[in-house]
Image (cartoon, rainbow, N blue to C red):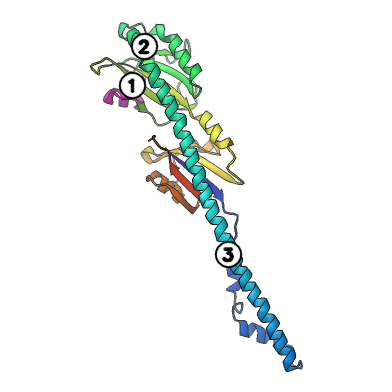
């Protein structure tokens, strides 16, 4: 998982240089000669004074150009630094958000009474337990218990139509059963609500490691996205969260239509992000706009 922060480039850095590169623009002697050439009857001393004045003006222009260039470069460096800092801070927030949910779900799933009810085949007695998970862990919008064949035995929503359905085709179920370890799934659309969630699957196992059931909590990415998008990062700044697995998928974006889509590959900062890098650079985004981008990996998450 990774974060991309970017700011539209508002500094026009090329016009002064283009103006100075026009024919005759950097030919000082020719320029002054042409101006003074229209004054053929003026005295030598006046022409010398004119030369001195034009020289001073040209020197001022050059000095101003250098100062503007230095100021522009300083602003760019400051934007790069701020965007990288914003990306790193948001990455830390996203990491804490997801890891906190994982730790709470693991604590609930490891309770002795949960193992006892599942071992006896009386999972219906855990309805209150699932309800408590959803109410106590705000980012979790739904929870469920599944048998070892992938059939949902119980859902946090009483009478949910998904109870009795098979989830054996889901990546989180297959990975959890194969490894016997908790697994954070790539984002999927919830069968129950239709919202984009990241299921966190936890095996419930005997002491010898035999898996008896799987408990899941669906982490609502809409709530995380709303929090990230609403943070003020400065004028014309935007931020996105991506899952970097399998070529990447956009988890949060200022344009809701981009959520759950794969990156276009046109943004070099995103490409570097997907390769595991962190940093900042000027890039052209998928819409063709120049942006100053900062990008960082989310610690502790895939």
Mark 1 secondary-structure assignment: loop
Whether pointer 1 and pointer 3 mark residues with C-beta atoms closer than 8 Å, the reply is no
* Residue behind mark 3: 69
Mark 2 residue crowding within 10 angstroms, few (<14) / some (14–19) / many (20+) = some
* Residue behind mark 1: 168
Give the magenta range: 167-181
Question: What is the quadrant of the C terminus in the image?
Answer: top left
Image location (x, y in percent) of residue 158? 47, 10
Q: Rounded to the nearest whole Å, what is the CA distance between mark 1 and mark 2? A: 22 Å
Q: Looking at the image, is mark 1 or mark 3 nearer the viewer?
A: 3
- Residue 178 lies in the magenta stretch: yes
Residue 43's quadrant in the figure? Answer: bottom right
Residue 92 visible in this rendered orientation of the protein: yes
As drawn, is 202 to the left or to the right of 135? left
Q: Nearer the viewer, residue 13 or 150?
A: 13
Whether pointer 3 and pointer 2 mark residues with C-beta atoms closer than 8 Å, the reply is no
Sequence order check, earlier mark of 1 and 2: 2
Residue 259's disc number: none
Q: Residue at x 33, y 10 (%)?
A: 118
Q: Is residue 124 above or below residue 37?
A: above
Residue 297's quadrant in the figure? Answer: top left
* Residue behind mark 2: 114
Mark 3 secondary-structure assignment: helix
Sequence order check, earlier mark of 1 and 3: 3
Sequence order check, earlier mark of 3 and 2: 3
Q: Is residue 277 above or below residue 121?
A: below
Whether pointer 1 and pointer 2 mark residues with C-beta atoms closer than 8 Å, the reply is no
Image location (x, y in percent) of residue 17? 58, 69
Q: Main secondary structure of the magenta part?
A: helix
């Amino acid at each position: 998982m990774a974060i991309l922060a970017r700011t539209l480039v508002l500094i026009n850095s090329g016009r002064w240089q283009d103006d100075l590169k026009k024919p005759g623009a950097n030919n000082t002697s020719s320029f002054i000669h042409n101006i003074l050439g229209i004054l053929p009857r003026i005295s030598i001393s006046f022409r010398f004074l004119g030369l001195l004045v034009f020289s001073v003006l040209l020197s001022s222009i050059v000095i101003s150009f250098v100062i503007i260039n230095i100021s522009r470069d300083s602003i760019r460096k400051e934007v790069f630094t701020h965007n990288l800092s914003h990306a790193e801070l948001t990455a830390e927030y996203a990491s804490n958000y997801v890891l906190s949910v994982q730790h709470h779900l693991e604590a609930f799933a490891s309770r002795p009474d949960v193992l006892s009810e599942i071992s006896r085949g009386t999972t219906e007695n855990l309805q209150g337990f699932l309800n408590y998970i959803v109410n106590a862990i705000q980012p979790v919008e739904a929870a469920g218990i599944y048998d070892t064949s992938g059939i949902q035995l119980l859902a946090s929503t009483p009478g949910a139509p998904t109870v009795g359905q098979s989830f054996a085709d889901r990546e989180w179920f297959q990975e959890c059963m194969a490894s016997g370890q908790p697994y954070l799934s790539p984002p999927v659309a919830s069968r129950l609500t239709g919202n984009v969630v990241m299921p966190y699957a936890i095996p419930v196992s005997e002491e010898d490691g035999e898996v008896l059931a799987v408990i899941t909590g669906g982490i609502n990415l809409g709530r995380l996205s709303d929090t990230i998008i609403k943070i003020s990062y400065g004028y014309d700044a935007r931020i996105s969260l991506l899952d970097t697995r399998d070529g990447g998928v956009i988890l949060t974006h200022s344009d809701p239509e981009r959520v759950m889509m794969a990156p276009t590959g046109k943004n070099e900062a995103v490409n570097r992000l997907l390769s595991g890098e962190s940093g900042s650079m000027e890039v052209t985004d998928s819409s063709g706009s120049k942006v100053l981008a900062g990008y960082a990996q989310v610690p502790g998450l895939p």
